[in-house]
Amino acid sequence: MTSVEKEISGGRFVRQSNHFTGRITASGADGLPAGPGRYRLLVSYACPWAHRTLIVRRLLGLEEVIGVGVVDPIRDERGWRFPEPDPVTGARFLSELYLATDPSFEGRYTVPCVWDAVTGRLVTNDFPAITIMMETEFTAYHAAGAPDLYPEALRPEIDELNELVYQTVNNGVYKAGFATAQEPYDEAVEALFGTLDLLEERLSGRRYLFGDRLTEADVRLYPTLARFDPVYYSHFKCNLRRLADYPNLWGYARDLYSLPAFRETTNFDHIKRHYYVTQRNVNPSGVVPRGPLISWDEPHGRERLASP
Ligand SMILES: N[C@@H](CCC(=O)N[C@@H](CS)C(=O)NCC(=O)O)C(=O)O
């Protein structure tokens, strides 16, 4: 199975579940041990779920600890392809790593996933777990002064907001874009903009979603915002409003983009070419639109919201 069309039921997009859910833990108890140079993160710059893992890796200073392999943004029926054979895993196609791990695997070969050099197998493609794992199990390897993106005292609130953002925003845009019937599309768009309105209000008095500090919640929201006007507004028909029509959300997105971890992992060329060329179920011609003409470098003015 290579096509998301197999995940449409009654006109509604129902995402496949993540297949590999192995764990990496600080001590190696209940999983494989965290350590430098052992694990490789396989990503596409186009993919919002992969984007969050790249942001966290960079924010925590794990670049020398966890390697990265980047696939070509254009995917055909063979799945994700490496532009050159991946120098560490030797793979040309991501499917090779999935099938080496489980020869009977029949789902989509998805990024992000984590590969282990010792076993030569994938550990996990469970994207929500990957960032949390880097935040909580790799602490011994975090750069000095790295932020605590998942502070214990805030976890229940962060998890609660993340769940709403996942259902209605991160995955909400896919539910709208992949819907093949009016009702699921309408439901998804209504829920999506309902949450964006809430977030716009929340960000009126706070610099980030949880105040002055960056958290996992910001990391999860940002990849969807970065793709909103270039892709989701038109390609996925999420067009009640543009991101640029929300002063707080748009300023917040530019504030995050001004940080190297966000800017250097945001590749608009890969993002646009991937969605418009690869998702022919939505865009049969594969033509990539030229716009939008927006500047992510305009001053965001949100420093005023930080406490002194
Ligand atoms: N692992 C999740 C989410 C990750 C995901 O959807 N990744 C996309 C890119 S954004 C992917 O790799 N798709 C490959 C395909 O559809 O063949 C899933 O299986 O739905």
Image (tube, rainbow, N blue to C red):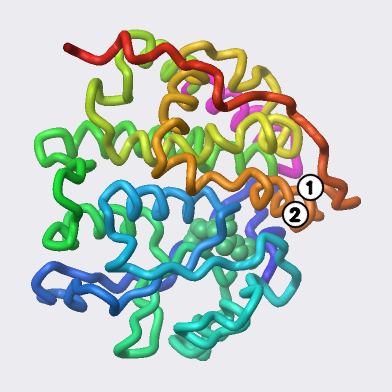
Q: Is residue 235 left or right of residue 248?
A: right
What's drawn in magenta, residue-wise? 178-195
Numbered badge on residue 282: 1
Residue 1 appears in the figure: no
Residue most toward the right?
285
Residue visible at 42% across and 19% down? 199
Residue visible at 82% across and 45% down? 288
The image quadrant where one finds ligand 1 is bottom right
Q: Is mark 1 within 8 Å of ligand 1?
A: no
* Horizontal and vertical percent position of residue 39: 32, 75
* Horizontal and vertical percent position of residue 296: 57, 27
Per the image, the residue denoted by label 2 is: 279
What amino acid type is highlighted by mark number 2? Gln
Residue visible at 19% across and 72% down? 34
Q: Which quadrant of the structure image shows residue 74?
A: bottom right
The rendered magenta stretch, by its main secondary structure, is classed as: helix
Mark 1 residue element: loop
Residue nearest the observer in this picture, 94 or 89: 89
- Numbered disc total: 2
The N terminus - image quarter = bottom right
* Horizontal and vertical percent position of residue 118: 30, 89
Q: Are dots 1 and 2 in contact, CB under 8 Å?
A: yes
Residue 127, compared with residue 211, is above or below; it is below
Residue 273, compared with residue 297, is above or below; it is below
